[in-house]
Amino acid sequence: MSNILHITASIRNDDSVSTAIGNTLVEALTAKSQGSVTNRDLSANDLPFVSEDRFAANLTPASERTAEQAELAAIADTLIAELTAADTIVISSPIYNFGVPASLKAWADLVARAGTTFQYSPNGPVGLLEGKKAYITVASGGTPVGSDMDFMSSWLTFFLGFIGINDVEVIAADGIMGADGEAKIAAAHAKAKAIAA
């Protein structure tokens, strides 16, 4: 059995290309492993941005939090629990203005918790979520994925490595506003199916 966490970050809901590719991958992975799936739609949940009080609450041990701190830390606790329980993480995201959607950055800020998902060592930070596999399904209208102007996939891959998830694979449909956009989308779906197989 495999526990899959599917995180989606597009504002386009059912019309999202990145989500559709992610769904293809998740369906193929679950058909192979008979695993469970947890879905986390970042665009629908209005994740809070980290404030000074929320940051302090997130770093306070659960047994020492005030009632107010427990309420502030609850969403991060939930997101971290989802991430920790997953063997496989699929993050489906478009590229917005060369980077990640704000909701995905908010998610990252909430799950990056010192002492829980990473820790500081004499040699620098060490990720604590090792042994997981991550896939990033990306859609872009004009930004070539992997190019110097793509700060989304490079940043997200780096961030996942920061928390210990170093086995990351990108499945991209970029340049989809061009004449061959439909072919690129079809190729990304085919790649997702092939990876799972």
Image: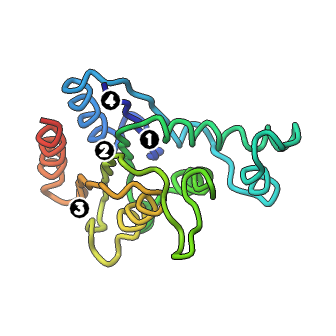
> Of callouts 2 and 1, which one flags the residue occurring earlier in the amino acid sequence?
1
> Depth check: 166 or 151 in front?
166
Q: Quadrant of the N terminus?
A: top left
> Of callouts 3 and 4, which one flags the residue occurring earlier in the amino acid sequence?
4
The residue where tag 3 is placed is 175
Report the amino acid beneath label 3: Gly
Identify which residue is drawn at 30% across, 44% down.
Answer: 17
Residue 17 disc label? 2
The residue where tag 4 is placed is 2
Label 4 Cα crowd, 10 Å radius (few <14 / some 14-19 / many 20+)? some
Identify which residue is drawn at 12% across, 48% down.
Answer: 187
Q: Nearer the viewer, mark 2 or mark 1?
A: 1
Report the amino acid beneath label 1: Ile
Percent x, y of residue 70: 80, 39
> Depth check: 17 or 6 in front?
6
Percent x, y of residue 127: 48, 59
Identify which residue is drawn at 35% across, 75% down.
Answer: 149
> Of callouts 2 and 4, which one flags the residue occurring earlier in the amino acid sequence?
4
